Amino acid sequence: MEHLLREHAPRVLGAVIRRFRDFGASEDAVQEALLAAALQWPREGVPDDPRAWLIQVASRRITDHVRAETARRHREELVVSLVPPELQLVMSLDGDELAGRDDALVLLFMCCHPALSTASAIALTLRAVGGLTTAEIAKAFLVPEATMAQRISRAKQSIKSSGVPFQKPTPEESAQRLGAVLHVLYLIFNEGYTATSGPELHRTDLSGEAIRLTRMLHTLLPEDGEVAGLLALMLLTDARRAARTGPAGELIPLDAQDRSLWDAGMIAEGIALISATLSRGSVGMYQVQAAIAAVHDEASRAEDTDWPQVLALYEVLMGLMDNPMVALNHAIATAMVHGPRAGLSLLEGLAREGRLEGNHRLDAVRAHLLERAGKTVAAVVHYRKAAERTTSLPERDYLLTQAARLSDEMA
């Protein structure tokens, strides 16, 4: 039931916003419709068309609210502002909805509103389309949850105050918003592939939705190299999903995975995509990341990985984007080529910058490189520190297991 509702939520929200042109009212109404479904469907059965049911219920919630406000304030203006006059208060499904139109991708572009900064647009879209909680979005942006809650609230208010309609953008507006849309899809996929919190390592509802939407975008923009690069990156990464966890859901790192479990079809499709787009000459950050993923996927064994090529690609990537997580992965690649001490030296610089302050991944990588350098006691300390800082149970268990293993070896 939870998966079904999450699957339909962004498409229903897109349809309701398209109809009523009010993000806040539409989001509230859809949340009420989802709650009603969660209570009624287990008792009465799932309707034949769940999406249409949710749209109708959300529409009634909005019109009920309009009527209540109108009665209280004795004004008709609110009705007019929410519902176009040519439409009835409780409308039947329009032709697009009856045909099963998918508004999720349109909603992505709508959320990248000109009244918003890129960061606010991404946060709002992650809520509306990705279904992420405020805490999950905050984790993705490396900011406190309270800060992200304020950002989302301000984003909604900015849209309302701007006077710019919350509606489907023109082709020109879509082109201007494409970068933010790609970033949103990237973050949704990452949250699905490695959940920042909770008992499961994966959230396939999110990663699957990100891949689905990116496929749709690639169909619309087949010549765009970065769209193709992002789709290739998702496919090449998601291809390893079955090998990332063991029988009990425990995390298995890349170098210990059974590569026969990797999805050969997804790898072939991803490599074909990135090979085609790289041949066009222009290179962007998603294409480079896809190329790195392809190098890993093409190695039949971990020891066959072409680490000098990976390192060279990370150096290109660092010239394209200033991101501390990229710098962290660059340090790992450096350690694999030039030795753990070289990687640890780069980590010290990252720590001094402070952008990964409190992030468990910095401690986890430091612990791994300290172990490779033979500094076992220090490695145990940082494995445990990383375990304390992560909110993902599979990652925490893996890190504690590594610390316990080293402690046993020292005993």
Image (cartoon, helix red, strand yellow):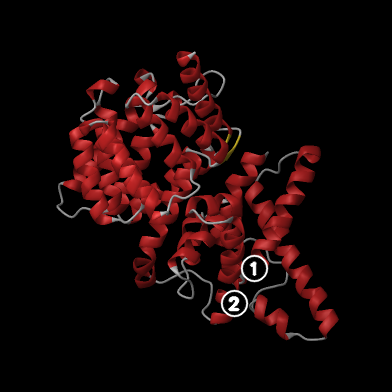
Residue matched to label 2: 160
Between 411 and 317, the one lying in front of the other is 411
70 left or right of 177?
right
Marks 2 and 1 sit apart, C-alpha to C-alpha, by 9 Å
Mark 1 neighbour class, 10 Å CA radius: few under 14, some 14 to 19, many 20 or more: some
User: For residue 203, which numbered disc appears in the image?
Assistant: none
Point 38% across, 21% down: residue:
256
Q: How many labels does the image show?
A: 2
Describe residue 245's horizontal placement relative to residue 82 as left or right.
left
Question: Residue placed at 46% from the left, 66% from the top?
Answer: 112
Please say if 219 is above or below 115: above
Dot 2 amino acid type = Lys
Image marks 2 and 1: residues in contact by CB distance under 8 Å: yes
**Mark 1 is on which residue type?**
Gly
User: Which residue is labeled 1 in the image?
Assistant: 24
**Neighbours of disc 2 within 10 Å: few (<14), some (14-19), many (20+):** some
Where disc 1 sits, the SS reads helix
**In the image, farthest residue toward the right:** 72
